[in-house]
Image (spheres, coloured by chain):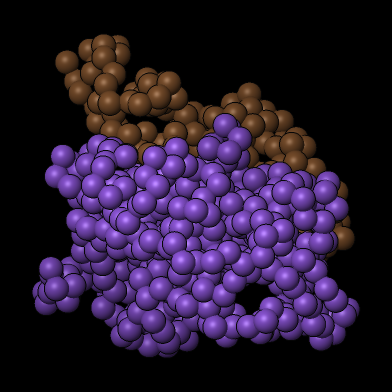
Chain colours: A brown, B purple
């Protein structure tokens, strides 16, 4: 039996969660204080994921903005974070952009889109 | 120009205050914002984690700001961008300047201070060494990367483990820089635990507690930084120095409420929070002048800034209807065992029309505590707190029912006790 101590990143409470594993299988989760926390703990020991936020270059903005902020529309496997940021290097968005606009489809083979998080004229 | 309510600052506090004041019936509101867009610092906080409390989902800073800005626009609330407020007089005449109107004077019946805070600078930290290029506050670096589109350095040392420093450790890493270490003077981090996990641990960035920068090398540009361990007296211990070759030093050493305007108009400032001393209506010592958000005391979560500012907006609208209320029944909130201050600092039970949130921070890390709120000698709130830390703001709810049950109240007291 292996015990893993985690700090939940779901919200600022940062609950201390202990997960008991047996050969990669989750046996017990204690210390969470909400549903999100339990789910985070289960995922964190089996398939940890993160939302990635970044910026991409922007052309044609009337306000002079040269980058626009963006994020992965869903969480992606933690191990793919750098593959995602590498893929963003070559993306150039054209203004106007609205919140939620897809800037890159299926980033780094994750099946997840990159969407804008800011409206820019 | 005359307005019923003038709001100084169009960040999260100013926007939430404006919306709440409008919804409470006020139709003459002006927001004054010095940047070229509404939303304040949220515009450069492109990471997610905002809005869980308010919207039940995790938003990025720009998304959170956009939701509030939209509510302001939908209500037709007036605002002026690129407008710098120069001074406010005690009788609420605001002098401001911008490129289209020139110098303007605005007479307001009520003023809501929502200027936010700024970062503690190198000058305030007394770090020895040269003064080369390559030393930035974490927030400046954040603006450069996320708004201006520049990467300010390639090999980075960060002093201070405030949330912006932690966020920037990750952000710089994602943009291809190497973050060598985060050094923190105190024996605990000033940032949220979840930021240590997802910004440092995820990227194997070491956090060295009880360490500080003892030397900065480089004449034109930073070429290296030396850190050393500090003892309980926070003085460097000789022989513990570690050198890092780097081109950039980021400083994330605390935030200070920005109260030059408040001081200028005669608002009493707390030496603990560096923000105005306010009563239960978030009103300062000047009737009709309110404060909310990071200008009042630095928050960890924008959701609570919005919540607090909405209360200030409602209080300002109430002031317009009822005028100044006598402060004769004010009771100072007292505390022991941990809190360094409370917001509000005083409560007049007769003026309380809603449940009140009392917020405070403790002075050090404490384990296995119980927070009790006393009305006279009766405990009305008792909450177990396994861990309390200066980096995480505490809050207690004082219900209007509890207040109503104590008609001759003399004492409002918060005690942090051994659990």
Whether residue B399 is visible here, answered yes or no, is no
Q: Quadrant of residue B45?
A: bottom right
Q: Is residue B291 left or right of residue B107?
A: left
Residue B91 in percent (x, y) is at: 67, 81
Residue B343, percent from left and from top: 43, 59
Q: Is residue B176 above or below residue B275?
A: above
- Which residue lies at the image location 26% right of the left edge and 78% below the top edge? B214
Say which quadrant the N terminus of chain A sits in: top left
Residue at x 28% of width, y 38% of height: B383
What's the residue at 26%, 42% (across, down)?
Answer: B378
Residue B284, placed above or below residue B21: below
Residue B373 point in image, percent of width and height: 30, 46
- The residue lying toward the viewer, choosing from B16 and A76, is B16
In the displayed structure, would residue A111 be above or below residue B38?
above
Res. B357 visible in picture: yes
Residue found at x 69% / y 50%: B20
Question: Which residue, as the protein is rendered here, is positioned at the far front?
Answer: B408
Residue A68: give x, y in percent of width and height. Answer: 71, 51
Q: Is residue B175 left or right of residue B357?
A: right
- Tally the marks: 0
Residue closer to the observer: B138 or B297: B297
């Amino acid at each position: 039996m292996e015990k893993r101590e985690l700090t939940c990143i779901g919200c600022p409470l940062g609950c201390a969660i202990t997960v008991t594993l047996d050969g990669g299988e989750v046996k017990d989760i204690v210390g969470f204080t909400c549903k999100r926390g339990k789910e985070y703990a289960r995922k964190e020991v089996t398939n940890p994921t993160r939302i990635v936020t970044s910026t991409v270059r922007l052309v044609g903005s009337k306000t002079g903005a040269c980058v626009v902020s963006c994020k992965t529309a869903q969480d992606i496997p933690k191990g793919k974070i750098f593959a995602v940021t590498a893929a963003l290097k070559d993306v150039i968005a054209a203004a106007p952009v609205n919140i939620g606009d897809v800037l890159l489809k299926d980033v780094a083979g994750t099946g997840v889109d990159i969407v804008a998080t800011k409206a820019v004229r | 120009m005359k307005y019923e309510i003038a709001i100084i600052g169009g960040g999260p506090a100013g926007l939430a205050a404006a919306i709440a004041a409008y919804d409470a019936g006020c139709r003459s509101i002006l927001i004054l914002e010095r940047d070229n867009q509404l939303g304040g610092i949220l515009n450069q906080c492109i990471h997610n984690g905002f809005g869980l409390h308010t919207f039940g989902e995790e938003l990025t800073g720009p998304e959170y700001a956009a939701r509030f800005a939209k509510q302001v626009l939908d209500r037709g609330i007036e605002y002026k961008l690129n407008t710098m407020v120069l001074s406010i007089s005690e009788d609420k005449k605001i002098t401001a300047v911008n490129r289209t109107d020139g110098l303007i004077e605005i007479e307001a019946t009520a003023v809501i201070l929502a200027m936010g805070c700024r970062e503690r600078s190198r000058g305030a930290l007394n770090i020895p060494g040269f003064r080369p290029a390559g030393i930035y506050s974490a927030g400046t670096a954040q603006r450069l990367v996320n708004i201006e589109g520049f990467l300010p350095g390639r090999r980075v040392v960060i002093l201070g483990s405030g949330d912006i420093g932690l966020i920037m450790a990750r952000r710089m890493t994602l943009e291809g820089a190497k973050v060598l270490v985060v050094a923190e003077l105190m024996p605990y981090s000033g940032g949220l635990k979840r930021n240590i996990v997802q910004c440092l641990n995820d990227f194997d960035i070491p956090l060295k507690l009880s360490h500080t920068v003892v030397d900065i090398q480089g004449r034109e540009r930073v070429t290296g930084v030396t850190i050393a361990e500090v003892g309980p007296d926070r003085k460097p211990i000789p022989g513990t120095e570690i050198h890092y070759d780097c081109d950039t030093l980021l400083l994330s050493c605390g935030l200070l409420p920005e109260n030059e305007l408040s001081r200028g108009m005669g608002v009493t400032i707390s030496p603990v929070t560096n923000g105005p001393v306010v009563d239960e209506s978030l009103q300062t010592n000047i009737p009709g002048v309110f404060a909310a958000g990071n200008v009042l005391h630095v928050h960890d979560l924008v959701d609570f800034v919005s919540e607090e500012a909405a209360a200030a907006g409602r209080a300002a609208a109430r002031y317009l209807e009822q005028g100044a209320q006598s402060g004769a029944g004010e009771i100072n909130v007292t505390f022991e065992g941990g809190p360094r201050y409370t917001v509000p600092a005083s409560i007049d039970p007769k003026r309380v029309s809603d449940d009140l949130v009392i917020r405070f921070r403790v002075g050090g890390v404490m384990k296995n505590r119980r927070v009790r709120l006393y009305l006279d000698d009766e405990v009305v709130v008792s909450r177990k707190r396994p861990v309390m830390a200066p980096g995480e703001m505490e809050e207690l709810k004082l219900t209007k029912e509890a207040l109503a049950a104590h008609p001759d109240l003399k004492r409002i007291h918060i005690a942090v006790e051994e659990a």
